[in-house]
Image (spheres, helix red, strand yellow):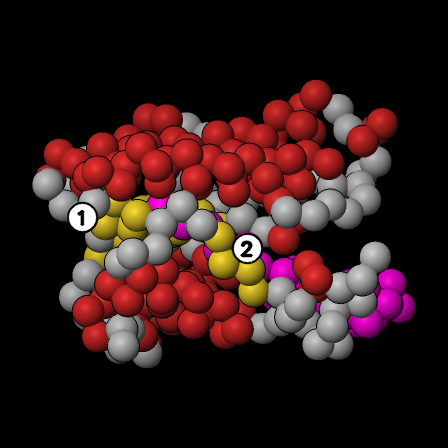
Amino acid sequence: MFEDLHGKSALITGASGGLGRHFAQALAGAGVQVTVAARRQAALEETVALVTAAGGVARPIALDVTDLVQVTAAFQHGAFDIVINNAGVTHDGPALNTTADDWDKVIDTDLSGVFRVAQAAAKAMIAAGKRGCIINIASILGLRVAGNLSAYAAAKAGVVHLTRSLALEWARYGIRVNALCPGYIETDLNRAFFASEAGQALIRRVPQRRLGQPSDLDGALLLLASDASSFITGTEIVVDGGHLVSSL
């Protein structure tokens, strides 16, 4: 179903670890030539090594999505077929204690950064006369809230609506824009928390009674990246084990 991905090019932001690294491996496994981007160069090299060891093609570039100069430079050699907007940060704490700097850091990376990258990607695609797709990594917290994550939830909700807006404007150019909304996915960063009593209690609220694994996102990712979704734009795909539809 996804044979058309072979030989295409992709840019993945936030690819120094976690889901970004996994997305790079999944796309490379489908024959996509991946450019992995993040601020941490040493960690990016690890991503490249993992991709190439599995027979894929990858190259790293330094990219801070809050820096418009760096974002513009990422597209100086032309357009990518696929752009995965994955870079993100969070702030965990009560809204009453969230400082202006805390708020600005999350919004600038998770929402404004998504816009910067998407805009630069679309400009490059249009200049090259190339159809393409942009996949913005949102979250179920952009559709439903949890405590102590006001900035993150607001940013991800913005990403969902931004996705719809950009899809409307750019459909005429053959550019599809969709959002992928993961639920709670196990990674190195959260594994210890989910092993705790509080983490186990949260898992019990997921109807499937388990955490998602990064590989659970592969089907949705490859679908949105491929021509199999050529008539899908301006929407979000939720991958959360039924968490959003759990009873209140």
Amino acid, disc 1:
Arg
- Disc 2 designates what residue? 181
- Residue 225: percent from left, percent from top: 32, 60
- Residue 202: percent from left, percent from top: 81, 64
Q: Which residue is located at x 70 percent, y 48 percent? A: 144
Would you say residue 200 sits in the magenta stretch? yes
Q: Which residue is located at x 67 percent, y 24 percent? A: 101
Residue 190, placed above or below residue 103: below
In the image, 25 versus 48, the foreground residue is 25
Q: What span is in magenta?
A: 177-204
In the image, 214 versus 227, the foreground residue is 227
- Disc 1 designates what residue? 131
Q: Is residue 5 visible?
A: yes
Question: Which residue occupies the extreme right position in the image?
Answer: 197
Residue 24 sits in quarter = bottom left
- Residue 147: percent from left, percent from top: 81, 44
- Residue 195: percent from left, percent from top: 79, 71
Question: Which residue occupies the extreme left position in the image?
Answer: 129
Contact? badges 2 and 1 (CB < 8 Å): no
Residue 118 sits in quarter = top left
Q: Which residue is located at x 13 percent, y 34 percent? A: 127
Residue 216 placement, left or right of 97: left
Q: Which residue is located at x 23 percent, y 67 percent? A: 5
Residue 15 sits in quarter = bottom left
Quadrant into which the N terminus falls: bottom left
